[in-house]
Image (cartoon, rainbow, N blue to C red):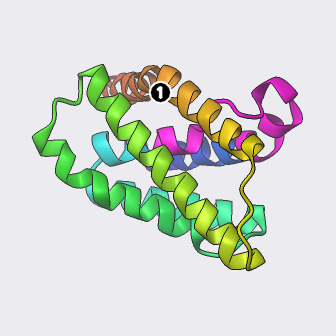
Amino acid sequence: MNPMARIGLILFLVIFQTTIYYAIPALNHFVDLLITFTIYAGLFLPFLESIVLILVLGALMDSITGGLFGLYLSIYFWIIVGLRPFVTLLNLKNTHTLWLLLGIAIGFKNLMLFIGTVALKQEIVFSSESFRAMAYQLFWTLALGPFLIRLLNAMDSHFKVNAQSK
């Protein structure tokens, strides 16, 4: 898949996750597609390409959400940088490895968003509803994340094979 197609995919994922995703009540605490894409980019794309894509993704999310500017950018950047050592050490075809990495990434993102919320509001805002939402999101991301990562990798391989045959 060429880089422009990946940027188009990022635009689709950002628009879907920030508008359509929250407009449908059944999807309110569903899988985090952007973290799943971040894990995919960090594990299966070349490092410089993944950094550029994640910087675009983070800047888009920071522009759209209206929170602390740079929060999503730094979250996605540190996830990518933190994943790089795992590429050579772990078996990426193993679902358990993907579960572990997705769980760590979701936990890191939620922790950073919580710290950002505390810094912005100057008070601790944590309720049972927010804990339940994080638990649902973690569950669905662990359930569907490895499948989505494999789907993105298969699409990427398919487009590489078609591009080479022309």
> Mark 1 = which residue?
142
52 or 98, nearer to the observer = 98
89 or 47, nearer to the observer = 89
Q: Is residue 42 left or right of residue 127?
A: left
Q: Is residue 40 visible?
A: no
Quadrant location of residue 159?
Answer: top left
72 or 135, nearer to the observer = 135
The span shown in magenta is 16-37
Q: Is residue 67 left or right of residue 97?
A: right
Quadrant location of residue 120?
Answer: bottom right
Q: Position of residue 113 (x, y in %)?
A: 61, 61
Q: Is residue 104 visible?
A: yes
Q: Is residue 87 above or below residue 157?
A: below
The quadrant of the rendering that contains the N terminus is top left
Q: Is residue 43 above or below residue 61?
A: above
Q: Which amino acid, by three-letter code, is at mark 1?
A: Leu
Q: Is residue 14 above or below residue 76?
A: above
- What kind of secondary structure does the magenta stretch mostly adopt? helix
